[in-house]
Image (cartoon, helix red, strand yellow):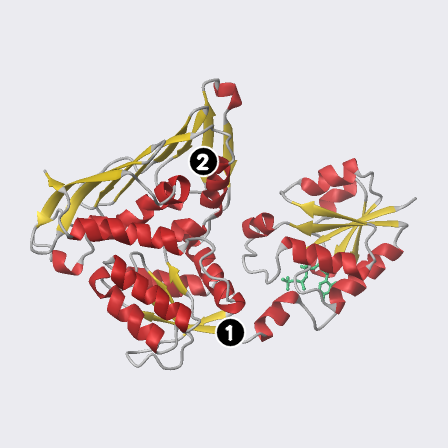
Amino acid sequence: MVKVITYGTYDLLHYGHIRLLERAKALGDYLIVGITSDDYDKTRGKINNQQSLIERIAAVKATGIADEIIVEEYEGQKIDDIRRYDVDIFTVGSDWEGKFDYLNEYCKVIYLPRTEGVSSSEIRAEKRKLIIGTIGEGNLCKKFIREMKFVNGVEYKECGDSLENVDAVYVATHPDNHYSDVKRALEAGMHVICESPIALSLSECQELMNLAHEKNLVLADAIKTAYSTAYSRLLVVAKSGRIGDIVSVDAVCSSLADGATEQGVNLSKKQNSICAWGPTAMLPVFQLLGKEYRSKSIVTRILDKNLNYDGFTKIDFVFDKAVASVKVAKAAKAEGELIISGTKGYIYVPAPWWKTDYFEVRFENAADNKRHFYQLDGEGIRYEIVAFAKAVESGRHNIYIGEETSKAIVGVIEDFNRHNYTEI
Ligand code: CTP
């Protein structure tokens, strides 16, 4: 029996794919089709497949051409598969001509002519694009606009104050203005992705969420860390029981880049530490331990009382069976690591944990330690944009950051703004 293997993403299955599969099958008696996993595609720079792995597998299966479907998950897997399945022929389309010659050592390699005039990319591009504008200036907006270029199906347009010509907006103004900017955008019928915190009080936050629900619009919290693969996996590992029961979450985020400690800096234009870093630092606390804490205490070093500008803030939470501590600073520097301690082991994410592609699960016996790597491109911002565009298209909101998490974050910041803290 001649065994043939071929690989691909097979997003939005089209007749170019089907012709390839038919000819691949005709090369032998048994056809194995390797379909790339979503994670593997991310590492290859394909971040915006329209269909999930399950949907893509179902589509290939429905053709009835493949005898066996496998998932391609890592670089170098092709050699393993060829050996494991005792493959005689490896084949792909001619767009890969020459790229897989190294497999000749293991089996016969055949490049089949690619079908002209059709590709998944073109089909994706034909779909109407989501036009996104920005409200705010500065680096965050610049980065967001730059990252949009990496995402199919979205396009940047300047929207001005009138918010015309766009379907959605990214809000990155000073946190004092988030509420009014988000409200204005939602009232104008725009989907919104807003830097966290969405508002500075729980009542305003709830009002915005209600408005979004009423108008059937997406209101997303833009904490980029939440959308990164490493962070998502870390949540899964921590919740799976691998490190036992979680007893403590300790997150530190600091940056001196804003120049808050320098002489003559106009702090009124800058975000204070609790707004700039609080949402990111509190994210793993609420996502891992829940939103119902028994008590919390905030200790802060205020740089400018009138502006409510904290240079350094530490928040301690007590939950029923765990504690958490968050340290945020724009006028102090510390190791920006995240540690999740459990009864059997702990998860360590090195600095800067909020844009990490790596974490370690560590145990008493170091031989049991596990390292996890996941590709992170564009600091996670492009994944955030992909998730936002998908939420708008599917109408399924808040998959990555639930409303309760956003509200828990806003609640702490509101308390801070009410001066419910100890000053040092
Ligand atoms: N293929 C083909 N003819 C086409 C498109 C794809 O023969 N018009 C082949 C590819 O060469 C590959 C397989 O189908 O062997 C799966 O390709 P995949 O990369 O999933 O599809 P594309 O349409 O090329 O996707 P994209 O536009 O995202 O690159």
Which badge, 2 or 1, is on the more N-terminal residue?
1
Q: Position of residue 311 (x, y in %)?
A: 15, 45
Q: Residue furthest top?
A: 365
Distance from label 2 to label 1 (Cα)?
A: 35 Å
Q: Is residue 258 visible?
A: no
Q: Quadrant of ligand 1?
A: bottom right
Image disc number at residue 403? none
The amino acid marked with disc number 1 is Lys
The amino acid marked with disc number 2 is Phe
Q: Are marks 2 and 1 in contact (CB under 8 Å)?
A: no
Residue annotated with mark 2: 359
Residue occupying image coordinates x 45% and y 62%: 388
- Residue 388 left/right relative to 140: right
Q: Quadrant of the N terminus?
A: top right
Element type at mark 1: loop
Residue annotated with mark 1: 129
- Residue 46 left/right relative to 332: right
Q: Nearer the viewer, residue 324 or 229?
A: 324
Q: Nearer the viewer, residue 379 or 408?
A: 408
Location of residue 145 (image quadrant)? bottom left
